[in-house]
Amino acid sequence: MIDNPQFVEDHNDFEDDDDISVNPTQSQNISEIILESRVERRSFLKGVGTGALLAGASTLTTKAAFASSTPKSSLTFKELPLGYDDTHHVPQGYDSQVLIRWGDKVLSDAPAFNPKKQTAEAQKKQFGYNNDFIGYLPLPHGSKNSDHGLLCINHEYVDRQLMFDGVGKKDIEKQSKELINIEMAAHGHTIVEVKRENGKWAVIEDSEYARRITALETEMELSGPVAGHKRVQTSKDPSGKNVIGTVNNCAGGVTPWGTVLIAEENFNGYFGGNPENTPEGANYKRYGMKGEPRYGWYRFHERFDVEKEPNEANRFGWMVEINPYEPHAKPKKRTALGRFKHEGANALINKDRHVVVYTGDDQRFEYLYKFVSKNKYNYANQEANMDILDEGTLHVAQFKADGDLVWQPLVHGKGPLTAENGFHSQADVLIETRKAADLMGATPMDRPEDVEPNLVTGSVFMMLTNNTKRKSGQEDAANPRADNKHGHIIEMTPPGGRGELADHAADVFKWNIFLLAGNPDNKDDHAKYGEGISKDGWLSDPDNVAFDSKGRVWIATDGAPKSGIADGLWAADAEGPARAQTRHFFAAPLGAELCGPCFTPDDTTLFVAVQHPGDTKESTFKNPSTRWPDFDETLPPRPSVVAITKRNGGAIG
Ligand code: FEO
Ligand code: CA
Ligand code: CA
């Protein structure tokens, strides 16, 4: 499965082993398998139905044959050649600026970064490790200012072999308490105030908004239906409402009311102790907990040892809402959005004023979810919306072979979600969301990553990053390739019409496959893109997604190096003749994945997060495969946020 092992390391996104499916019901959809996948069928139905879909899906060969009629993309940037080296690249005519790096000052009293003498006290005040999600929130709140705002950035996990001199990736039993606490302080989230002056972005020092949120000591509130339930009570928190910290914050989303939602993804890897020796054994097993932690935190912090604090792991795996405009507001874990390995979440206000949130469970054979709020958004009183995510209905997706997408509600007492199956309340349904979704017949997917609505077209895009565990015979319409090495992208279309007319609260959508990733020149990949894709336009392992204000799709990848190319960013029209004709825009340095693509409201700046640079095999603090972005012999590689602008101004693309 790995073509180029020299450059591929199982970066600690748990993708190489923890992503082995733990879903016992993964074969349930075999009855739905059809001989001809939906994407192939649709390609014969050019122009029929909900759009051109993969009409015109092409390979390089067909492109050559019809070169004179290559559909013209609305994107005009000069495509970046594919490659893979120790630094990052943007297309000709674009500038890039490293804005903030691991260890840079966030709080005003942060000490200067010294990786050889790092302390937890320093790390708590400095930019954390492995930046992932980026949200840009304009200042003042409610404006569309594209020159001044808050950047909200996740720190997903750590690469201890690149952070600490002489520490190996698996040395969790040898680490001192100080190193453990540095790791915990390097997790979480950062909020910084940023401003553009004379074309250059800068982080404002001593900003009142500057904030670090960590796994080490940030207090959070558990809110919604699970708050206070006995399964989330611990010896330190008998109220079941106050949690310390957040972990594995992968992707996220900015809400229409000016908060950010940050995901807790692979929380299982943070807990030591044998889950089978707790009353939650079966529950924890379904989330991949098996007493083989990736972190040594449990050695010094009892709450991460499930044998000592058996309910603590029920307090992780949630979406966390943060109000960056209120620097002292307590982050809230929104339990109504379900507990699983959330990749991210994106919220919108539906035309009926209910809030709808899309969120995927990133593991092989896991599911896609949608939340619909009980209350309607109150445009007259913003304050009234601040807890709108605490009540509503979570649904799970069933992808039918006929092109329907059916949203099944996960409601206690409905269908099999009853006491006979272990669900005594809605809290039980939410704590064991995966089990509830299994029973409702959800469709096991090829690792749902970012899921985001395109506000221009009204459709919703889901990144499915890969699934090499799907065997021949386990294909279905929505996951049409066995041994899916390169992933694919599904577009989901609510009824009602384009843009604001789309009814995201509806129970049934339509779906289609936007593209099948991989190299079109490699027949075994069975890749499909829009017509006219260039030799540099193909991608692998779609992970994060963003839309510019014209509704064009920007896709960030995590895993392309196994195919010999750097991870990076690709853009395409979402509709029209050049739909799904992806074009290469950004290349990340050796070992890095690309995350957090995020535009300012006017599209003149694109922020990206370069995560785990230098994370290749044999790469260490002393001898890293790249020292990006400083290229200073005294510094290791540093995960960083990069701001991309067009050289003479104007909208990107
Ligand atoms: Fe943290 Fe699913 O990537
Ligand atoms: Ca991701
Ligand atoms: Ca990833």
Image (spheres, rainbow, N blue to C red):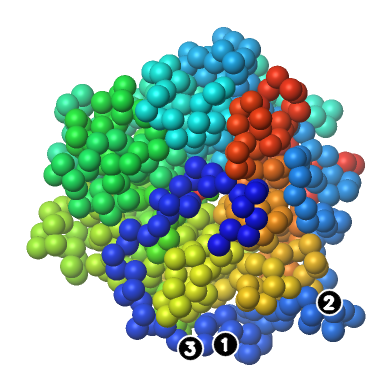
Q: Which residue lies furthest to the left in this view?
A: 420
Which tag is nearer the camera, tag 1 or tag 3? 3
**Label 2: element kind:** loop
Mark 2 residue's CB less than 8 Å from ligand 2: no
Cβ–Cβ under 8 Å for marks 1 and 2: no
Could you tell me how far apart the alpha carbons at marks 2 and 3 are, in whole angstroms? 31 Å
State which quadrant residue 591 falls in: top right
Location of residue 504 in the rendering, given as x and y in whole percent from the top left corner: 46, 64
Viewer-side residue, 157 vs 442: 157
N-term-proximal mark, 2 vs 3? 3
Q: Which of marks 1 and 3 is nearer the N terminus?
A: 3
Q: Position of residue 38 (x, y in %)?
A: 53, 82
Q: Which residue is located at x 67 percent, y 59 percent?
A: 563
Camera-near label (2 vs 3) is: 3
CA gap between label 1 and label 2 equals 23 Å
The reply to whether dot 1 and dot 3 touch (C-beta < 8 Å) is no
What residue type is disc 2 on? Thr
Residue 43 falls left or right of residue 449: right
Residue of label 2? 70
Residue at label 3?
Answer: 35
Residue 231 lies left or right of residue 63; in this view the side is: left
Residue at image mark 1: 41
Using the image as rendered, state which of residue 150 and residue 11 is in the foreground. 11
